[in-house]
């Protein structure tokens, strides 16, 4: 794996140490470079993300200047292998970290990646709900922050609470799913998605 980033934006030392140890154990490598062309040269896939994430809004303009040479465009994509894939966790800022020609390319796999994330998240929710059905609390698994969160604009400032805190929840779940245990899993997952 080759990480291309501007000076001062390298991954944390402990993360690099972890990645390099795993790479060595599996015959791979993990390199950091400040040259985007070097990072892309011969790559099987180019993966990028937004330049300023949530909580970094005040740095947006400065980051645009620093990261501009790292934009995945036709010229940078041409440095990768001819069958290299383009990946992005979405949502993308077209014209910033990626151009239309790269993200809309036949080699772009961003929507397949997003679909795979959906299934991974459903599996996590299923596992968490399965633990809850066995009478285990989900609180240690999710952390206390998820149990009571403010609802944003349009939510009237009310608080979301885990369904077990709602009166009558267990009664409704039991009566609606007693005949079909498999359906219980699906409906529990669907309810979990709506709550969070």
Image: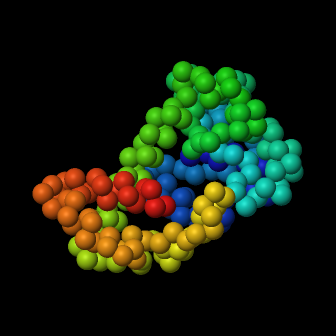
Q: Position of residue 139 (x, y in %)?
A: 42, 77
Question: Relative to 48, does residue 59 appear above or below in the rendering?
Answer: below
Nearest the viewer among 127 and 6 is 127
Left or right: residue 12 versus residue 123 is right
Nearest the viewer among 157 and 60 is 157
Is residue 119 shown to the viewer in this render? yes
Q: Residue at x 26, y 57 (%)?
A: 185
Q: How many marks?
A: 0
Is residue 38 shown to the viewer in this render? no
Q: Position of residue 167 (x, y in %)?
A: 36, 76
Left or right: residue 129 versus residue 5 is left
- Res 104 quadrant in image: top right
- Res 177 quadrant in image: bottom left
Q: Residue at x 82, y 51 (%)?
A: 60
Left or right: residue 154 versus residue 172 is right
Q: Position of residue 112 (x, y in %)?
A: 46, 35
Colour basis: rainbow
Left or right: residue 67 versus residue 143 is right
Q: Position of residue 194 (x, y in %)?
A: 45, 56
Q: Residue at x 62, y 64 (%)?
A: 156
Name the residue furthest left.
179
- Res 41 quadrant in image: top right
Nearest the viewer among 72 and 38 is 72
Q: Residue at x 65, y 35 (%)?
A: 40
């Amino acid at each position: 794996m080759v990480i291309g980033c501007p000076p001062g934006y390298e991954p944390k030392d402990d993360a690099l140490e972890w990645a390099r140890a795993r790479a060595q154990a599996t015959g791979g490598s993990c390199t950091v470079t400040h040259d985007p062309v070097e990072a892309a040269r011969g790559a099987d896939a180019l993966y990028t993300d937004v330049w300023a994430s949530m909580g970094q809004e005040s740095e947006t303009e400065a980051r645009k200047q620093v990261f501009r040479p790292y934009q995945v465009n036709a010229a940078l994509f041409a440095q990768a292998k001819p069958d290299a894939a383009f990946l992005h966790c979405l949502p993308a800022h077209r014209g910033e970290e990626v151009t239309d020609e790269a993200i809309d390319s036949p080699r772009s796999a961003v929507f397949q990646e997003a679909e795979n994330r959906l299934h991974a998240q459903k599996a996590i929710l299923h596992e968490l709900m399965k633990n809850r059905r066995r009478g285990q609390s989900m609180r240690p698994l999710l952390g206390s922050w998820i149990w009571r969160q403010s609802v944003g604009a349009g939510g009237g400032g009310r608080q979301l609470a885990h369904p077990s805190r709602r009166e009558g929840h267990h009664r409704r779940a039991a009566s609606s799913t007693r005949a079909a245990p498999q359906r219980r899993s699906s409906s529990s997952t669907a309810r979990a998605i709506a709550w969070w």
